[in-house]
Amino acid sequence: MRTHFDEQLKDLHNELVTMGSMCEEAISLAIRALTENDAALTEKVFAVDSEIDEKEREIERLCMQLLLKQQPVAKDLREISSALKMISDMERIGDQSLDIIEIVEYVKKCDRESKQYIEEMSNAAGKMVSDSVEAF
């Protein structure tokens, strides 16, 4: 029984890593759409955000199954509850990539130096997402 539980926890970790990489991709695409004024990239951001939303539901379902069927305690319970908190934060990151898309019209008027700062911020945000998932 414990082997099956350990496999499910491993699946949970893999799903979190996948969701984290989706968030990084959404941020990256949004910033590229912003700096390159590319409408096709804008559509990709919407698609990735939908995938992030679906992944959140999948992970939440997995966490609930683990909680209800396995009744974890101590370390395992903390891991599952942390995962539940993380997925809501990562889902918001996906939503914020859509917020970036909304400012494309305003940024068209910015100079190159301002766009460079925006790119640097996005790289830092992507690294934070990656670091937080890795830390988990």
Image (cartoon, rainbow, N blue to C red):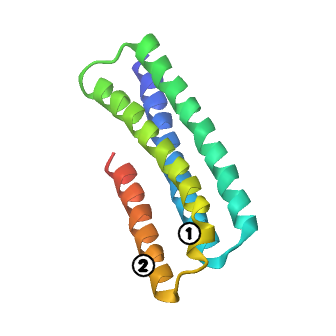
Residue 45 coordinates in the image, percent (x, y): 65, 57
Check disc 1: other Cα within 10 Å, few if <14, some if 14-19, many if 20+: many
Kindly give the residue lying farthest to the right in the view shown.
40
Look at the numbered disc 2 and give the secondary structure of its residue: helix
Between 42 and 11, which is closer to the camera in this rendering? 42
Look at the numbered disc 1 and give the secondary structure of its residue: helix
Q: Quadrant of residue 3?
A: top left
- Say above or below: 70 vs 7: above
Give me the residue at 47% from left, 30% from top.
7
Between 51 and 11, which is closer to the camera in this rendering? 51
Asked if one can make out residue 25 in the rendered structure from this viewpoint, the answer is no
Residue 56 coordinates in the image, percent (x, y): 54, 35
Residue 134 coordinates in the image, percent (x, y): 37, 53
Give me the residue at 56% from left, 69% from top.
31
Q: Quadrant of residue 78?
A: top left
Between 57 and 98, which is closer to the camera in this rendering? 98
Residue 10 coordinates in the image, percent (x, y): 45, 36
Hey, what amino acid is under mark 2? Tyr
Hey, what amino acid is under mark 1? Ile
**Quadrant housing the N terminus:** top left
Give me the residue at 39% from left, 35% from top.
83
- Say above or below: 123 vs 74: below
Q: Which mark is residue 117?
A: 2
Q: Write down the residue under mark 1.
A: 31
Q: Quadrant of residue 51?
A: top right
State which tag comes first along the sequence, 1 or 2.
1
In three-dimensional space, the C-alpha distance between marks 1 and 2, rounded to whole angstroms, equals 11 Å
Give me the residue at 36% from left, 59% from top.
128
Between 42 and 1, which is closer to the camera in this rendering? 42
